[in-house]
Image (cartoon, helix red, strand yellow):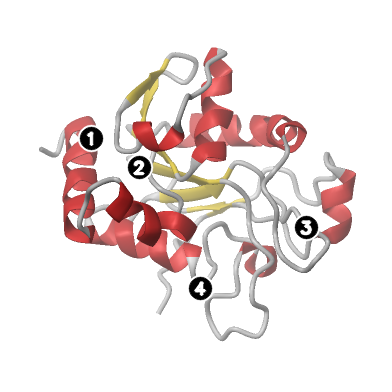
Amino acid sequence: MPQYPETRNVLEPNCTRCPHLAETRECISWGTGPLDADVFIIGEAPGAGTPEAEQWKGGNWTGMAYTARHSGRVIRDLMESVGYPDAYHTNAVKCFPPDNEGSNREPTDEELETCRTHLITEIEQVEPDVIVPTGKHATETLLALDDRTLDGFTDHVLEPIDCEALSTTLLPVLHPSYQNIWIARLGYEPEEYRAALEKELDAVCGCG
């Protein structure tokens, strides 16, 4: 059973900042989770979703970030396994970016920039100890606040990064869609990857 947090953070109902996304989305995929969470998870953008699914329909249909039966379930199970089931989950871009073939594409720089104010508002409300961006785009949209970029995202996975603009620590992790492939390529066994993540989270959150 999916463990959706009770709080859904609706910042701008019926937002149309990106008219092309507003026309194709089913729901805005708002952040979910406790507003006093220590850990703040950021995905890239919601996928098309699975409306016929009994539970894991996805943010494009539930209006709640990371509730898809693949990515949502993977990242929520991962966070629970390392002792942080009450993380706050959101996306860098809140609306499904279609690829015109029924699936999702990567969010554009313009979409990331337009939606960034929503993301900053969420971070300011939650004031987490650590922000965990899942994947390259989620990480780079935060580093853009410090006018920084990454050379080789996978080289920075599980590497704490100070974000001066947000006065907090970033801890990039693999995007759930690529986790199974890249864990081995980074030299981890799955349990080693989880242990490394738990160690870094505990260190930042003061639980170690």
Residue matched to label 4: 69
Instruction: From this view, report whether residue 150 is shown above or below residue 146.
Output: below
User: Can you say which quadrant of the picture contains the N terminus?
Assistant: bottom left
**C-alpha separation, residue under disc 4 versus residue under disc 3:** 20 Å
Q: Are marks 2 and 1 in contact (CB under 8 Å)?
A: yes
**SS at mark 1?**
helix
In this view, the mark in front (1 or 4): 4
Q: Amino acid at mark 3?
A: Asp
**C-alpha separation, residue under disc 1 versus residue under disc 4:** 28 Å
In this view, the mark in front (1 or 3): 3
Residue 99: which numbered mark, if any? 3
Residue matched to label 2: 39
The answer, for residue 85, to whether it is visible in the render is no
Instruction: From this view, report whether residue 102 is shown above or below residue 207.
Output: below
Q: Amino acid at mark 4?
A: Arg
- Quick one: label 2 or label 4, which is nearer the N terminus? 2
Residue matched to label 1: 205
Across and down, in percent, residue 129 comes to 32, 32
Q: Nearer the viewer, residue 16 or 149?
A: 149
Left or right for 56, reference 155: right
